Amino acid sequence: MDEGLGQVAAQLALTHVVLLREQPGRPAGRAGPFGPPQWPAFWWIALAVITLFGALAALGQNIGMFLTLILLAAGSALLAAARIGAFSGVRIAAGWVLVASSAAAFYTAGAMLLEQSYGGRVILPLGRWSLRGNLPGHQAIRVIGYPAGMPGARAGQ
């Protein structure tokens, strides 16, 4: 679920803060160049529910992924409410929550990338449940692989 999460959050935030913002001279909730305001509402509800369950599952691993997913679920739920009720203020708030989700996703993805690159050592804390998993320089995870350095090869083959 975490593959491409930063990309998804960034695209959602960009779409709803920049491209679909209210335009001067057009009443809130009126159909703009992208179609009626209600058409994606039920898709956003489904996305919010699925992402909420992903957030609850991520809570068992680390706070960084949980924060990313819970913000994405909240932004999706706000966006669904804004689309169904045609509330422009709620839609703007949803866009900013999605921007926050994008920022959390970029931090989480960067922290996970650095952790894997440095052999499982913590560089940026992810908010793991163990204290040792949050101290920079300490071993947070066991790297999947053999001592030869190639994940699928045994030493001496």
Image (cartoon, helix red, strand yellow):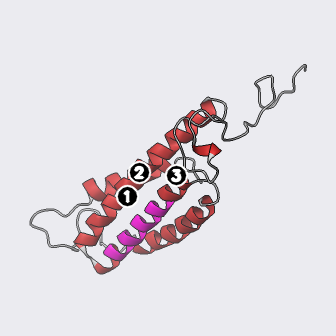
Q: Residue at x 49, y 57 (%)?
A: 67
Of residue 61 and residue 154, the one placed in the foreground of this image is 61
Amino acid beneath label 3: Gly
Residue sitting at the far top: 156
Is the residue marked by circle 1 packed among few (<14), some (14-19), or many (20+) residues within 10 Å?
Answer: many
Amino acid beneath label 2: Ser
Disc 1 + disc 2, Cβ < 8 Å: yes
Residue sitting at the far right: 157
Quadrant for residue 140, please give it. top right
Amino acid beneath label 1: Leu
- The residue labelled by disc 1 is 98
Q: Marks 1 and 2, how far apart in space?
A: 6 Å
Q: Marks 3 and 1, how far apart in space?
A: 15 Å
Q: Vertically, is 61 above or below 43?
A: above
Task: Give coordinates of residue 146: x percent, y percent.
Answer: 81, 29
Which badge, 3 or 2, is on the more N-terminal residue?
3
What type of secondary structure mainly makes up the magenta span? helix
- The residue labelled by disc 2 is 102
Of residue 140 and residue 48, the one placed in the foreground of this image is 140
- The residue labelled by disc 3 is 64
Q: Nearer the viewer, mark 3 or mark 1?
A: 3
Q: Secondary structure at mark 1?
A: helix
Task: Give coordinates of residue 83: x percent, y percent.
Answer: 33, 74
Q: Which residues are magenta?
A: 69-82
